[in-house]
Image: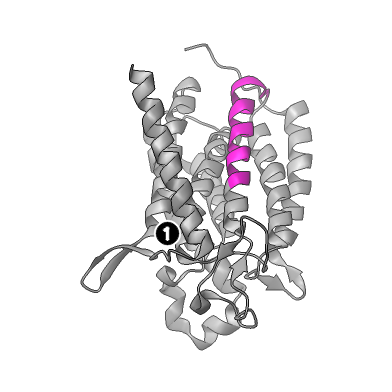
Amino acid sequence: MRRVYITMILTAVFLGLFFFLRAVFSGHLIVDPVLIRIGNFGIRWYAVLIASGIILAYLLGREEMKREGVNEDHVVEALFYGVITGVVFARAYYVLFNLDYYLKNPKEIFMTWKGGMAIHGGIFGAFLVLYLYTKFKKNVSFTFLQGLDILFTYFPLGQAIGRWGNFFNYEAFGKPTDLPWKMFVPLNRRPIGYEKFSYFHPTFLYESLWDLMTFAILYTYIKRFRKNFGEVFALYLIIYSIGRYFIEGLRLDSLYLGNLRVAQLVSVVFIVFGILLFTYVRKKGRRAVFEAS
């Protein structure tokens, strides 16, 4: 009977979500990026969804930490530094590739609620924090590559959830389209030159689905197939970057370096580095062997 109730609840949730998304994608319903307003203060969906993604990824990752004998206090401490650094790097990365604008509007550098966070910057920040933490923390209970494996097994799940913040902000969408799953974008959110178009590729959705698939692959891999530390992180760089490369080609808000889309350039570098890293750690890396719990 309990399973019947759970099935009924899940079915109701998915049906409600389906009709909600259909209303928004068709333009019959316009979503508000602010979840709660208290005077001049507002809590935005974007922040709530990113925080939710981080929390869920951490809670699910505790199982793997326990299996690998990692001290949870060390993880919480590293995560604290990682989140702060990740946000700073994600913002700095975005500002760097929009430097002309922010030099003219320096006050907006800190206005993150207006948008402007780049996930590649967050990845670089997380990588740096884990390296420094494992290098300087005394008696740390996990190695650098081990920490990267655990983090990037669950990181794409957090990405998948966080991408829905773009949905509520009407951002990170792609070129105009007439496909059945086209998404309506209000006039005030359309880029200059695209005002006459109403429907666009929901590229945030494409990436969210790709992230979910990436998570499923990496979760299965770390449980069943990983031989040495570093393999999961390498696979994350390869799999995520393949999807990001092609999805980025549809987007209208890409960051550019000359005539090159930065995200595509970084994706190519990540794919090559991921292949080299996987080949190396698979052959010569430290064994990832744990006692059954």
Q: How many marks?
A: 1
Residue drawn at (64%, 32%) of the image? 217
Direction top: furthest residue: 292
Q: Quadrant of residue 198?
A: bottom right
Residue 99 appears left or right of 55: right
Of residues 242 and 181, the one nearer the viewer is 181
Task: State how the image is colored.
Answer: one colour
Whether 23 is drawn above or below 3: the answer is below
Q: Position of residue 68 (x, y in %)?
A: 50, 23
Name the dominant secondary structure of the magenta segment. helix
Q: Quadrant of residue 245?
A: bottom right
Give the residues drawn in magenta, as a range. Answer: 209-227
The residue shown at (65%, 83%) is: 193
Considering only vertical position in the picture, is 1 above or below 284? above
Q: Is residue 95 above or below residue 280?
A: below
Instruction: Check the image and name the residue furthest to the left.
Output: 39
Magenta run includes residue 286: no
The residue lying at 48 percent from left, 20 percent from top is 67
Q: Nearer the viewer, residue 143 or 241?
A: 241
What residue lies at 68% left-to-right and 53% top-to-bottom?
244
Q: Is residue 216 magenta?
A: yes
Three-letter code, disc 1: Tyr
Give the percent coordinates (x, y) of residue 220: 61, 26
Q: Which residue is mark 1?
A: 46
Q: Does residue 2 show up?
A: yes
In what quadrant of the picture does the N terminus appear? top left
Query: Would residue 78 be visible to someone looking at this image?
Result: no
Q: Is residue 190 left or right of residue 88?
A: right
Closer-to-camera residue (293/7): 7
